[in-house]
Amino acid sequence: MELLLSAIDVLARWDVLLALTVGSVGGVLIGAIPGVGPAVAIAILLPATFSMDPIVGLTVLLGIYGSSMYGGAIPAILINTPGTAVNALTTYDGYPMTARGEARRALSLAYSASFFGGIFSIICLILFAPVLAKIAPLFGSREIFLAALLGIILVVIVHRGQTLIAAALVGFGIFINTIGLEPVKYSKRFTFDQAFLSSGVNLIVVVLGLFAISQAFYLLQSDDEKIRLTKLRGGLFQGLRELARHPRVATVSGSFGVLMGMIPGVGEFTAQFLGYTYAQRTSKRPEDFGRGSSEGLIASETANNAVPAAAMVPLLALGIPGEALTAMMLSVFYVHNVVPGPQLFQNQMDFVVALYIALLILNVMVLVFLLFATNHIIKLIKIPNRFLGVCILTLSFVGVYSLRNSMSDCVIAAVFGLIGFVLKRLSLPVIPIILGMVLGNIMEVKLRAGMARVKTPFDFIDRPVAMILFLLIIMVVILHIRRVIADRKELKEAKWSNKHASTNFGMHLSRRRDYLSTERGKAVRAKHLTSFRQSTDKSSQQ
Amino acid sequence: MVGILLMTICTGLHLWKLPRRRINIADWREAKKWFAVIEFGIWFFVYVVTVPIIGYLFATLIFMPSLSYRMGYRTRTPLLWSVAFGFGTVVLFKSFLSVKIPGGLIYEYLPSALRSFFILNF
């Protein structure tokens, strides 16, 4: 109780409340515009928060982080384009509902499900905080190194079908992070005697390049789309009632969100996938999924909104970000002189609880705002793509240039913008680069610190938490190898399968052709052999 | 070293696993799109270079409508919107949030009272 009161004391300031309002409203608006995600907004606004008080700056950015997914559901449901990447699954059931004239019901259901997901996860974490405070001090340098390594491995294997290139991009991120002065002995690494490389490549510059500038480039070279919007009539309160009819789906999806959010490197997509699959399997009408099922919508929105609060756990307790947004939040914390890690949980527990309460208030504010202002927000979807590109490019300048007033930072950001654009065109992920940079740095520092007390290799994992993490890493790697082998087997079977009519005919033709050409070859060789037996048969010549 | 090795080996393996085929016209079109984006990079760079010379406000007020015009928004309404957005951005970030963007060289020629006002706010 005392902790709760001191946490409320941290928040009870007019500037914090104003920051919370600006962050939540801004997050919804940013989420509602397809093409501008929370990553772009946080990267642009981060330098603007440098001059603010730590809790004020953090609340603005936390507000954007926590509320953008609410806004992202609006274009996903109304025009089949997710506002933020994590709302992709919402389009599966949200848009078919709009198509059959139930846009209001879909939006109301999405808001209610998101609200439930957010609140559920925060309550879980507030209850879980005392346990975390006991577990967090058990993490020393070795354990944090292993947790970061687990995070990197999970980031790679989560990109199914793109594992190799995801690993290469993680490697690229680690490499970028090593450029500049090395943290212990200050020897130069990969600077090639260039002054602008000595200070290293700043994470914010890379994030702005990969997310904001690349997105601006992408929008600038795309075409404007004509968007037709259906007008919403009536209130949006019915969703809460409908949500109450599916408590099991909402609770299980919310739990998936909390669990997946806490595991570094996994995040919203896996949580949504698990929640959605569970809802479909246990539903009485599984055939409705993908055709406007209310349960599907509840599952995806609850799961993705339960993640942000849960993702703050590894970030605050261990200082390990699990995804791109929390990686950015980590730099936000550092900038504001708050060092996440076990020490934070031990010494500044009121600050941690204050952040959770801020998230709780934020969810209520966002829901109220959305219930009354949706009709006005949907106009934002109509902003033309290329005009949006011009705006993002202008805003990116503020983010990059105001960091260090450095021209070379702007050039580096533009180069990363180009890299991000090419990756986007090739449908390759950029998140592994960011996590490679952040986790690579953490791993390097913690490995150096941890190795001081390690004499034999076994010393590294002789503590219980380290051993558990080590076993987890081994298990994850083995499971991945098993899955790769199973995938290969499936692919091979599909190649030789004659189950499908389409592949059957083509495969038959190709096999027939191969067979005929082999037979023909045999016949020709046999003919040649009989015609020129004398000249080739050496034994008969002798 | 770990980063470089991971990067090279995995890229090599990824390229090795890709299906082999000849470069066709669609690939050239895609490459053209990649290179076309360099133009926007140059626009950005010119904007960055001009800010310390003519000041953040004027550079933004020129950049926003020019790039909008280049992108095909040639009627009055979007151009006015672009000017308004540019002005709003400068006021929000420089005047209210006081982000660190240096004043333009051009402000030196202003009368002293106006000069400090412009350097601080625009």
Image (cartoon, helix red, strand yellow):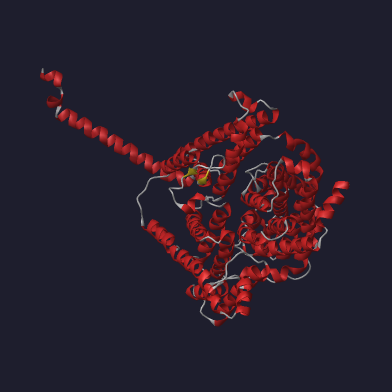
In the visual, does A483 lie left or right of B18?
right
User: Do we see residue A350 in this rendering?
Assistant: yes
x and y, in percent, of residue A118 in the image? 75, 52
In the visual, does B62 lie left or right of A302?
left
Please say if B96 is above or below A492.
below
Q: Which of A491 and A263 is in front in this view?
A: A263
- Number of on-image labels: 0
Q: Which of A262 and B46 is in front in this view?
A: B46
x and y, in percent, of residue A28 in the image? 70, 62
x and y, in percent, of residue A411 in the image? 48, 59
Q: Which residue lies furthest to the left in this view?
A: A542
Q: Nearer the viewer, residue A18 or A90?
A: A18
Q: Which residue lies furthest to the bottom in this view?
A: B76
The quarter holding residue A85 reads bottom right
At 79% from the left edge and 38% from the top edge, which residue is drawn? A131
x and y, in percent, of residue A139 in the image? 70, 35
User: Do we see residue A367 in this rendering?
Assistant: no
Q: Residue furthest front?
A: B112
In the visual, does A420 lie left or right of A296?
left
Question: If the image is split into quadrants, where does the C terminus of chain A sit?
Answer: top left
Q: Nearer the viewer, residue A492 or A511?
A: A492
Please say if A456 is above or below A363.
above
At 77% from the left edge and 41% from the top edge, which residue is drawn? A346
Please say if B113 is above or below A91.
below
